[in-house]
Structure formats: structure tokens, C-alpha cells
Amino acid sequence: MELKGFIKTSLIEYPGKIVSVAFVGGCNFRCPFCQNPDLVLNSQSLPSISEKEIIDHLLSKRKWLDGLVISRRPLSGKNYRKVAGIVDEKLFRKVKESVKILSSSNIDYELRTTVVPGLIDQEDVISIARGAEGVRKYVLQQFVPKVTLDKQYEKIEPYSKDKLEEMREKIADYVESCEIRGV
């Protein structure tokens, strides 16, 4: 795993916690709304961050940090392959298998869907929640139309807070906890 980005302090990636965030470079997904296009398309041109640098930082700040988030993103659902640009069935199965392993573990995690109008609608959110039934924490993340992999997505109007609330209500029976982030 090659790390290509590092945020020393974040209050966003793990709400209620102070964490550092490491970003994996060379993502094999091609989510058009991705807000880290350089990590996806040009990761080889970005400097690598050594595990030692990250571990040294974590150790030096261990009194204040609650953890480390390793960000790679994605989830599943009926349009997931299209949204993420996945054509490899084996890769898609691995994503689903990872969700299953996390769901049955004692590891603290969250599954997150960036809700992008035109790609993810209410029925998709319901399908995703059904497929992730029993997940402890599921987040509907507001799409932010800035710095996207596909520049056309910078013109899309995000869903309203009310619409996201409606989606959350529709999936309440499938996941233990669902929150909305970014509105």
C-alpha cells in the first residue's frame, strides 16, 4: 500500500474524534465525483509518505489523537460498478467481501456513500442499505461540486438537506446508525 497523502489532524473524517488521515495513491476506482483526482490519476507524480513518518507522527501526538483513518473510499449497490468505474467482477467481489468482514468484526468503522444527483438516487441508497443490512454506522455524505475527477460534476447541484433526511428515514430499518454529513 503506497501512501500519497497525509493530513496530520482532522475533525471531519471521524466525527467526534481527532485523527490523522493517510490517503492511498493509485486508486483503481474512477468515481467521477472523486475530490482527490491527483491521487487517482497522477499518484506516481506525488511524493510518497513513509510509514515511518506516519508512525512517528502518531507516536508523538498519541496523547491528542484518537486514531488513524486510511482513506480509499467506496461501497456497493446496484449502480456501484458504474459509479466507481469497476469492470472487474473480482474487484467488485473483494469490495463486498471487505464490507462483510468489517461488519462482523469488532473494528470501529463506517460505510459512507457520497450521494451524487444523477448517479445515486433514493432507490440506490435503499439498495445499498439493504445490501449492507446490519452495518453499525452508515453515512450519507453530501456531494460537494468542487475539484472533481470529471469536471462536469462541478456543475451539479447537490441534494437538499431535506432530501437527504428523507433518504435517511427510508433506510433506518436496515442499518444501526445512519447520519448525514456535509450539509
Image: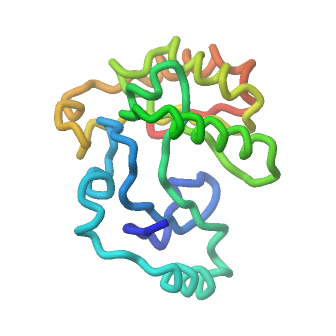
Q: From the viewer's side, name the closer residue of 148 and 63.
A: 148
x, y percent for residue 16: 64, 55
Task: Identify the residue at horizontal 47%, vertical 73% (top origin).
Answer: 8
Give 81 or 56, whichever is nearer the viewer.
Answer: 81
Q: Position of residue 113 (x, y in %)?
A: 51, 34
Residue 53 lies, with reference to residue 65, above or below; the image says: below
> Of residues 166 and 40, which is closer to you in this image?
40
User: In this picture, is 179 found above or below 37?
Assistant: above
Write the residue at 33% across / 40% down: 30
Placement of 52 over or under 5, stated as above or below: below
Quarter the C terminus occupies: top left
Question: Total marks drawn?
Answer: 0
x%, y% of residue 121?
44, 16
Task: Locate residue 22 relative to residue 96 in the image: left or right.
Answer: left
Please provide percent x and percent y for residue 107.
76, 54
Q: How is the image coloured?
A: rainbow
Q: Quadrant of residue 85?
A: top left
Q: Is residue 145 above or below residue 20?
A: above
| Residue occupying the point 51% across, 40% down | 91
Q: Quadrant of residue 46?
A: bottom left
